[in-house]
Image: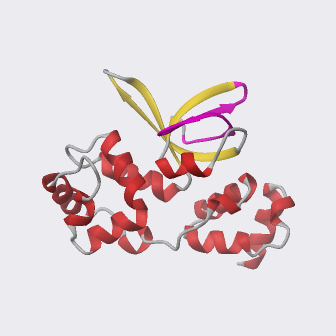
Amino acid sequence: MISSIHGKIIYADAGFVIVECAGVGYKVNVPKDLVMTYGIDDEILLYTYLQFSEQNGFALYGFLTVSEEKMFEQLLGVNSVGAKVAMSILSAMGVNGIASAIASNDAKMITAVQGVGAKTASKIILELRDKIDLEEAIVVPVKHAEYTVTMKEAIEGLVAFGFKEDKAASIVAGIEGAEEMDFQQIMNIALKRI
């Protein structure tokens, strides 16, 4: 399974990018806002979900944060929600919006997304209400475009140690000169500050 991909964007179009990694170009389906934020020759780290279907073969979906990738997987677990609908919901609402709609039992927020009807919205709320930790899902937005790839990797390293993403991001953001440091330097300083 491909869990993440780190490389340079060599092509971008509506809904996907091609990321070159070790001389191989990977087509990665991404939320629409990512295509508007990143461009050709930008370096990027995406957390990915690899899906296989008999009709379409393999498809790779990429997200800037682990929380987006987890929410995508959880949406796919809802009966009648496919990858296209899950990506549309994430693109339109983001993790916070989805968690907020589930917490407030507001199906109208979800039906505002093109292609999502009332039945599907109700299923999402019903099936995910007990499966997601709403407090963990509603995070302070992290502006990943301001971080270098190495800084993003350090944030994910801290998340792997059990820290919440917003806490990890604030620790890394507070390291003076982190933009110039390598992964190990950032992690050493971050772990000393905890």
Spot occupied by residue 35 in the image (x, y as percentages of width and height): 55, 45
Who's the residue at 72% across and 25% down the image? Answer: 23
Q: Quadrant of residue 134?
A: bottom left
In the rendered structure, the answer to whether residue 143 lies left or right of residue 148 reads left
Note whether residue 163 is visible.
Answer: no
Quick check: is 12 in the magenta stretch?
yes
Quick check: is 38 in the magenta stretch?
no
Q: Is residue 188 above or below residue 23?
A: below
Q: Quadrant of residue 159?
A: bottom right
Q: Which residue is most to the left?
A: 119
Pick the residue in front: 117 or 163.
117
Q: Which residue is most to the bottom?
A: 193
In the rendered structure, the answer to whether residue 111 lies left or right of residue 55 reads left
Main secondary-structure element of the magenta-colored stretch: strand
Pick the residue in front: 19 or 54.
19
In the rendered view of the protein, which quadrant contains the C terminus? bottom right
Pick the residue in front: 18 or 52.
18
Residues in magenta, as a range:
3-23
Who's the residue at 56% across and 53% down the image? Answer: 64
Which color mode does the image show? secondary structure
Q: Is residue 100 above or below residue 10?
A: below
Note whether residue 19 is visible.
Answer: yes
Q: Is residue 126 above or below residue 6?
A: below
Spot occupied by residue 4 in the image (x, y as percentages of width and height): 58, 43
Q: Quadrant of residue 9?
A: top right
Who's the residue at 22% across and 62% down the image? Answer: 125
Q: Is residue 82 above or below residue 170?
A: above
Spot occupied by residue 108 in the image (x, y as percentages of width and height): 21, 65
What is the count of numbered marks? 0
